[in-house]
């Protein structure tokens, strides 16, 4: 966004309020992707012990034969984190989009081309993880995560196959479109302006949901995103705008054990008996 800067906080708040229509139009003018700038955190591929994941050896430390196919569980996005776009994603934001999107890609750095596609064998769903499970035990609570269960084949993208296999993919990012959001303003920033009441109420409602409160303390406004649309792909990135997006499961699998083009089924939230909102892709379906 193009934000005009003022030395006077009151003037800055006034400009933000008066230009909300313009700012929201800017936010919708192109899909949101990783900007490569976070709040200084680095995520990583982790297991339940917090150890960096690689797919090079079995439980005994013996090398695993390269079968040319990996099963990967990627955290593409996580709620309750203030990201570098000043967005706080709210649980439930992907629910509608997941019921509508039938084809989703896993790409390299949002490069939606034949060279950039890593896999189209994706099962996408949401699942709750504690921040400790995501590699951030210093944060309390949990996040509703957008998860990709992906089959990555060496024959499709050898370079990214190797990056995942060696445990180098530490962050992911989603190409998304804003659908519904609320502008949130800190009360002290508003300085008693009666016309800002709704924005202050939004802050009071959504700010307590933010896990990285230290980052929230450094800003006077943000957007609470309550509904968003997936735009075709999620990506492996060097550094995502949402930093709690690691690779959390990684395994070598015999190609014969995986049906071509099929990543499997997963329900949205088994504990809550939510309807299945997974998306699947059969590689040959579009050729029939």
Image: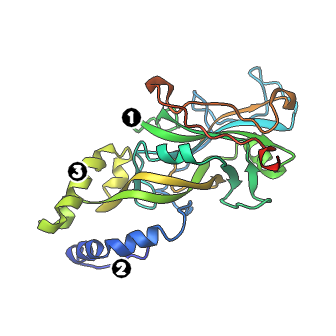
Where does residue 107 sit, x and y in percent of width and height?
70, 54
Task: Tell me: 154 left or right of 239.
Answer: right
Where does residue 278 sit, x and y in percent of width and height?
59, 37
SS assignment at label 2: loop
SS assignment at label 1: loop
Q: Which mark is residue 278?
A: none
Question: Residue at coordinates 47% horizontally, 30% vertically from top-left?
Answer: 274
CA distance separating discs 2 and 1: 35 Å
SS assignment at label 3: helix
- Residue 102 vs residue 240, the one in the foreground: 102
Where does residue 138 sit, x and y in percent of width and height?
42, 38
Q: Earlier in the sequence, mark 3 or mark 1?
A: 1
Question: Residue at coordinates 49% horizontally, 33% vertically from top-left?
Answer: 129
Q: Is residue 85 above or below residue 149?
A: below
Task: Tell me: 114 left or right of 223.
Answer: right
* Contact between labelled residues 1 and 3, with CB atoms less than 8 Å apart: no
Residue identifier under label 2:
4
Task: Tell me: 189 left or right of 63.
Answer: left
- Residue 228 vs residue 54, the one in the foreground: 228
Q: Earlier in the sequence, mark 2 or mark 1?
A: 2
Where does residue 93 sit, x and y in percent of width and height?
44, 47
* Contact between labelled residues 1 and 2, with CB atoms less than 8 Å apart: no
Q: Residues within 10 Å of mark 2 (few under 14, many from 20)?
A: few
Q: Residues within 10 Å of mark 1 (few under 14, many from 20)?
A: some
């Amino acid at each position: 966004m193009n934000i005009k800067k003022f030395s006077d906080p009151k003037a800055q708040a006034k400009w933000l309020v008066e230009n909300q229509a313009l700012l929201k139009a800017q936010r919708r003018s192109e899909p949101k992707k990783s900007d490569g700038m976070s709040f200084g955190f680095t995520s990583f591929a982790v297991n339940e012990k917090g150890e960096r994941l690689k797919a090079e050896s079995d439980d005994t430390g013996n090398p695993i034969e390269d079968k040319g196919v990996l099963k990967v569980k990627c955290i593409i996005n996580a709620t309750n984190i203030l990201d570098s776009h000043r967005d706080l994603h709210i649980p439930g934001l992907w629910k509608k989009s997941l019921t509508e999107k039938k084809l989703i890609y896993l790409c390299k750095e949002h490069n939606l081309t034949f060279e950039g596609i890593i896999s189209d064998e994706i099962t996408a769903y949401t699942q709750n993880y504690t921040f400790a499970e995501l590699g951030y035990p210093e944060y309390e609570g949990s996040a509703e995560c957008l998860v990709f269960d992906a089959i990555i084949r060496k024959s499709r993208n050898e370079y990214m196959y190797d990056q995942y296999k060696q445990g180098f993919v530490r962050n992911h990012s989603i190409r998304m479109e804003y659908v519904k959001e609320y502008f949130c303003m800190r009360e002290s920033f508003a300085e008693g302006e009666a016309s800002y009441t709704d924005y202050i109420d939004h802050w009071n409602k959504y700010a307590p949901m933010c896990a990285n409160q230290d980052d929230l303390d450094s800003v006077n406004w943000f957007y609470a995103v309550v509904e968003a649309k997936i735009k075709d792909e999620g990506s492996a990135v060097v550094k995502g705008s949402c930093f709690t997006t690691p690779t959390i499961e990684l395994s070598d699998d015999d190609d014969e054990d995986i049906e071509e083009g099929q990543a499997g089924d997963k329900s949205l939230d088994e504990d809550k008996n939510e309807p299945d909102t997974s998306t699947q892709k059969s590689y040959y379906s579009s050729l029939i």
